[in-house]
Amino acid sequence: MAKISINLSEGTVKKEAKKDIIVGIDLGTTNSLVAYMQDGQVIAVTGEDGKNTLVPSIVHFATGEQIIVGDAAKQFLLTDPGNTIYSVKRLMGKSYQDIAKAGQYLGYEIIDEDTESLVKIRVRDRFYSPVELSAKILAELKTRIEKTLKEDISKAVITVPAYFNDAQRQATRDAGKLAGLDVLRIVNEPTAASLAYGIGLSPDESKTIAVYDLGGGTFDISILQIQGGIFEVLSTNGDTFLGGDDLDRVIIDYWLSRHKIKTALLTENKELSQAFRIAAEEAKKTLSTENQYAGRVGEWTLGIDKSQFETLIQPLIDKTLNSCKNALADAKLSIDNIDSVIMVGGSTRVPLVKKAVSDFFNQPVNNSLNPDEVVALGAAIQADILAGNNKDLLLIDITPLSLGIETMGGLMDTIIPRNTKVPAKAGRQYTTSVDGQKNLQVAVYQGERDLVSDNRKLGEFILRGIPPMPAGIPKIDIQFILDADGILTVRAKEMRSGVEQSIQMKSAYGISEEDMARMLLDSIKNAEADMKIRALLEARNEANNIVLSADKFLKQNAAILSEEETTRTLELVNVLRESVKGDDKDVINLAMKDLNTYTEPLAHRAMDVNIGAAIKGKKL
Ligand code: ADP
Ligand code: MG
């Protein structure tokens, strides 16, 4: 049904222009591709050869300003590794610190300035950010689809791993923008894969699925729950350094040991090393359909058969299954709860991988679609939904780490706990700790530890202009709003005066999955120690407050207290003040108790006197 629009100023009537096509893009570590939907069909776009849908995520900087992306760039990994950038997705939204370990595996130069800023890659005398490099890949995909459809394309949905944090998602969005694409939505890869299989498209469908994604350099397992068209990521697990490349490496090692070739020979000779890599990948792919492989590199005749290969890769597959186990445990589910298993990533073409996953989940797996295309196909389906061509589906994710703010004594006060469904909104009220306090610093942290110093700071701001009031009187409402893309907005508002301040967390640098895992582990390992510290800090905070109010009390009620009472109170306050300097919460609590017990009757007396005075002063 065509829509009619009327232009009131011109008095003209015109049919609405053809709807824009929104494309789906899988921006992968190893390969990227673009897909679109037409007349209810999802189509992965091929290059000029009409066959290859995959664009290797490789950018080569030729001499002169020429930039080559994809298959044509691949050969330069061998001949010009320093000017040929691959695996840039690993660097998205990351700081030098985050990738200190990973850098040594990459053949190009990562610039090491100060540790907390975003990484840059040096190519000859220019510096490129991962966002710029990803934009080159996206631009290539954009050109590809524009050539195919013979029209301009400006809107896209781009997929990211489910565990990508705000900074990584934002970097992906920025890359799209830089490539001239309006990124309407960032979608999780497992959600897209599920949509490609038509799972979750019906509103009355209720399912729990596992998405097993073994790509070129990474492994991800995600458990999703789909209900009433809503996708919820229950848990994610995996290994950012386990993928098809490792299967290749296992073959190389096998050849090296069989032919008694020294590893040093390959470390010294980059070209030879790449030649071995290419042969190993070819062998691996051959063994997905044949029983043996034979090839040549230099003077060596290299062979391997399927059963040898399978023996060699079994430990790697076992590692992925272990991640599956952990993901199930995190989702508090067992294998019986999984209704469908979806295979994603080129490496799931390996027959033993399919068999092992199927055996593990005790059911046949979904692998009828090309595993290296499913994510893009699903992204195209999501794009079509956004274009309004399908019923409205919601995508819901979880936040992997708790979000909160720093409170007195450096304690973490969690506002959105980890594993909360996103989008999420939560808030809490705070107050000032000093009389007449005009500014309040709000520092936002991510992590599971009780002390903010053990967590990761996302940002901070100062709420200014709180009208002077006694400590404890202002009501400061702090709200955390986490949107569907995982971007956090923090808003602070003083309720009595209405002063307000907010910031968006596009955290300056990202966090690696290893760091995330480490943070979670640390929080478990240190739970007991953390609890003790929290108790101590809380006792100290309370004691400090009591010292302040006792001082105030003494000043305000000097007239009604005997000298002995004042002296004794001062003594007890001093004991308390001293106890705060120590590390024993019991000593602090005891000193508080002593002071309270002694001053309670005095406070009652003071109250009576004050009320009496108030009544007397009242004119009736
Ligand atoms: P990513 O998601 O990391 O960008 P892909 O899903 O495209 O990567 O997977 C790329 C990996 O799949 C590479 O390691 C490649 O060697 C491997 N692969 C592709 N085809 C096959 C095959 N037929 N058999 C085994 N592995 C394959
Ligand atoms: Mg992938």
Image (tube, helix red, strand yellow):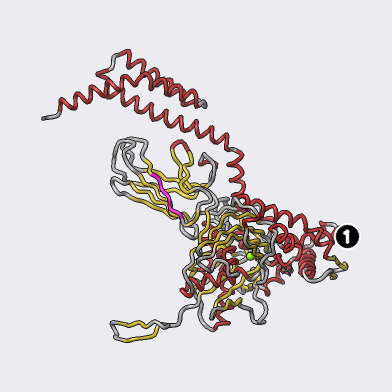
Q: Nearer the viewer, residue 585 or 85?
A: 585
Q: Is residue 142 left or right of residue 76?
A: left
**Quadrant location, the N terminus:** bottom left
Position of 391 relative to 355 (above/below): below
Q: Residues within 10 Å of mark 1 (few under 14, many from 20)?
A: few
- Give how far across and how far down residue 538 sits, in percent: 46, 33
Q: What residue appears at the point 49 percent right and 66 percent down from the top-left corner? A: 393
Task: Write down which quadrant ligand 1 falls in.
Answer: bottom right
What is the x, y in percent for residue 20?
47, 78
| Residue 538 in the figure: left or right of residue 11 | right
Residue 284, picture quadrant: bottom right
Name the residue beneath numbered marker 1: 258
Q: What type is the residue that disc 1 sits on?
A: Arg
| Magenta: main secondary structure | strand
Of residues 499 and 79, the one nearer the viewer is: 499
Any part of residue 170 in sight: no
- Residue at 70 percent across and 70 percent down: it is 76
Numbered disc 1: secondary structure: helix
Picture quadrant of residue 577: top left
Q: Is residue 453 visible?
A: yes
* Relative depth, front residue between 93 and 145: 145
Q: Percent position (x, y) of residue 149?
A: 55, 82
Segment tinted magenta in the rendering: 424-428
